[in-house]
Image: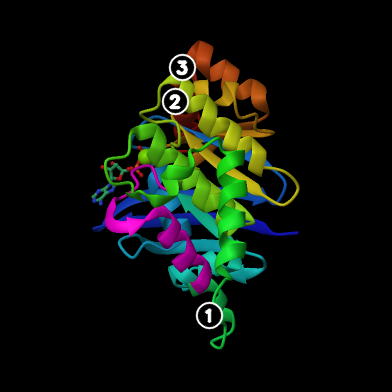
Amino acid sequence: MSELVIKNLHVSIEGKEILKGLDLTVKQGETHALMGPNGTGKSTLAYTLMGHPSYTVTSGEIWFKDKNIIEMPVDERSRLGLFLAFQYPVAIPGVTVANFLRTAINARRRAENPQDKGINILEFRNMLKEKMEMLKMDNAFAGRYLNDGFSGGEKKRAEILQMAALKPEIAILDETDSGLDIDALRIVADGVNALTGPQLGALVITHYQRLLNYIKPQFVHIMLDGRVVESGGPDLALHLEEQGYDWVREKYEEEKTSIR
Ligand code: ADP
Ligand code: MG
């Protein structure tokens, strides 16, 4: 069983410390929600886990499948089974969704076996068709340029389609709900729900509780000021919806002063 273990992680960007001793473990088969106010470092964590070069790990550990991945390049992390759905996916004019996915799948296969001829075109089409049906996506979607002129909902669906095609073991979804109306939110959540299960561990990052009406996590974590300060079950998210973040902030401030 795959496991992502983060221990006492400290991360800086341009010399400014953003993550300040973050601990978190996500196992295959589990769905975790990571919540927190804007600017607490949720996206920083997501990018760091995936290996974005702008984020410097100054101390701490990240283990995935019993390997320390801190020095591992992005493509290797991906091949090992990590996936990140971006908060702000970039457009790639000229590259269709289908081409992009086929290239990604083939790059993986060739990394494992340089002699690989690439995925059979019929096999690829059938796979893509099946995944797109599961995500209730129109066939024409595959022929459009990736994220080029996509609505917010389409961009997020394209991210989930990539996730379905690449079959990661641990997926990080960074604010997959941001910018979505309620219909799009439901479609994206249905897609995520169709993919979660014993084969997938998910870290669902969200600012709002509303996504958790559709995606049911077993574990909920609250992040403040670069750390996970509170963990619990689904009721923690409901509590947040009713009470906001103030009580966590107060509790956290008290703990900090009592340590001093
Ligand atoms: P969240 O996703 O929780 O809203 P972020 O991880 O995006 O938080 O940001 C955390 C902090 O890091 C913020 O104070 C933000 O201004 C800062 N930050 C994020 N990205 C950069 C960057 N590329 N350069 C400088 N500061 C950044
Ligand atoms: Mg963010």
- Judging depth in this view, the residue of 164 and 128 nearest the camera is 128
Q: Earlier in the sequence, mark 3 or mark 1?
A: 1
On whether ligand 1 comes within 8 Å of the CB at mark 3, the answer is: no
Say which amino acid is labelled 1: Arg
For residue 12, side relative to residue 250 (left or right)? left
Q: In whole angstroms, how far apart are the C-alphas of marks 2 and 3?
A: 10 Å
Say which amino acid is labelled 3: Gly
Q: Residue at x 57, y 62 (%)?
A: 124
Q: Looking at the image, do the residues carrying marks 2 and 3 touch, with CB atoms under 8 Å apart? A: no
**Numbered disc in front, either 2 or 3:** 3
Q: Earlier in the sequence, mark 2 or mark 1?
A: 1
Tell me the element at label 1: helix
Q: Residue 240: horizontal and vertical position, in percent?
A: 52, 19
- Judging depth in this view, the residue of 170 and 239 nearest the camera is 170
* Residue identified by numbered label 1: 110
Say which amino acid is labelled 2: Arg
**Numbered disc in front, either 2 or 1:** 1
10 Å crowding of disc 1: few (<14), some (14-19), many (20+):
few
* Residue identified by numbered label 2: 249
